[in-house]
Amino acid sequence: MDFDIIIVGAGLVGASLATALKDSGLHIALIEGRAPADLTEDASWDYRIYAINPANARFLDQGGAWSRLDQSRISPVYEMHIWGDDPAARLDFSAYEAGVEELAFIAESRLMQDGLWRVLQEQSNVEIFCPAACAALEVGDESAILILQDGRMLRAKLIVGADGRESWVRAHAGIEAQPRAYGQDGVVANFETEKPHRNAAYQWFREDGILAYLPLPGNRISIVWSAFDALSQELMALPPDEFCRRVQEAGRNTLGQLRLITPPAAFSLRLLNLEQLVKPRVALIGDAAHNVHPLAGQGVNLGFQDAQQLARVLLQKESQRDCGDLLLLRRYERARKEDILAMQLVTDGLQKLFNTPDPLLRTLRNTGLSLTNHLGGLKNRLMRHAIGELG
């Protein structure tokens, strides 16, 4: 079977690339191991929650998915309050002060996946192979051949690896990856809160890690606690009531008593910076291309920006040039490398800065946080970059 593009991985980033190419005239194969869950049969809350910046919400809307989401399950963020490990050190962001409607949208992974999947099933230029798994990849001068485990052979001008942090495409394309573990887990869970969050997000840089409260609709929040391995294991072993108490105290009782509504889960945190995002007939996007610390909530946003930029390059290519041409793919790589590296430097630097016991650095980091709060121009620029208005 012949295609222009084969996208391996129909998660949020891979699916968004396919929807962005709906009017391209390109014939696309989408390979995925399993279909998303049927939301009509499950009204519980997904523990995988993302903060989507407004620029990427518009990107998903252009592809047709955002408008299909159940808006009653999405929470806009109007304010964000950040504290250092000194209670007097804080940094505040406000959508109103910045002259924007919202700072972000908090949405469940499976909600967005469902919206994207429904668009894809109606998209005439996409053929979905699901469930399907890859067995072999052969890259030639004129095309690449992907062989599935059931023996089917697919041929395309371009293979896109959107298959996550343990990317099969990346490994079989010979792109070297040397991730660096942070020695931390992201502990996630959802809660009902005693007090209303008023669409504000909260973050505390603590000596034992970084804790974020993200607002969900109603009196509900999702948390991400970037905790060192020993603390993560301790938290995951706690009974529900004790886990709630620990999260409540770590958040300085900001929202009163907490009641657990989804069991906690944990995932290891790491940094991955690749020397190359492309090779002849191969391009990587999303977690296959980079991993960042979640303290800024920018991982999936970087992935959506990858998809948007790769789609732009493919849509603007010269008519005589095929999709897998290396010089074409390097346009995508050049456009993304700087942004990815900048986010990695910021998040990695902050993680190191706030996870050291040095008293001098403790004073400097807390002073810097408070000083930034009073520098309107700098704070506004940081905020506009976070919401996707500055590249």
Image (cartoon, rainbow, N blue to C red):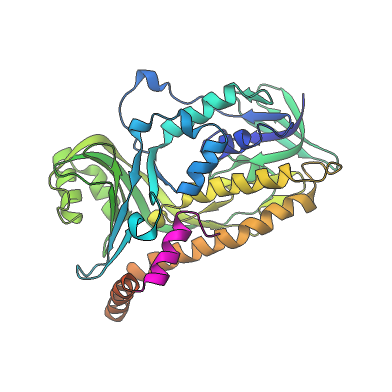
- Residue 84 image-quadrant placement: bottom left
Up the image or down, 355 lies above or below 106; here it is: below
Q: Viewer-proximal residue, 105 or 16?
A: 105
**Span highlighted in magenta in the image:** 375-391
Up the image or down, 27 lies above or below 169; here it is: above
Q: Position of residue 288 (x, y in %)?
A: 57, 46
Q: Position of residue 373 (x, y in %)?
A: 31, 70
Q: Is residue 323 left or right of residue 362?
A: right
Residue at the spot 48% in from the left edge and 55% down from the top edge: 292
Residue at the spot 79% in from the left edge and 53% down from the top edge: 327
Q: Residue at the front extreme?
A: 99
Q: Is residue 1 left or right of residue 272?
A: right
Magenta highlight on residue 243: no
- Residue 133 image-quadrant placement: top right
Q: Is residue 328 left or right of residue 283?
A: right
Q: Viewer-proximal residue, 43 or 152?
A: 43
Q: Position of residue 377 (x, y in %)?
A: 41, 71
Q: Position of residue 346 (x, y in %)?
A: 46, 65
Residue at the spot 56% in from the left edge and 49% down from the top edge: 305
Q: Viewer-proximal residue, 380 or 110?
A: 380
Magenta highlight on residue 390: yes
Up the image or down, 198 lies above or below 211; here it is: above
Image quadrant in which the N terminus is located:
top right
Q: Viewer-proximal residue, 251 or 136?
A: 251
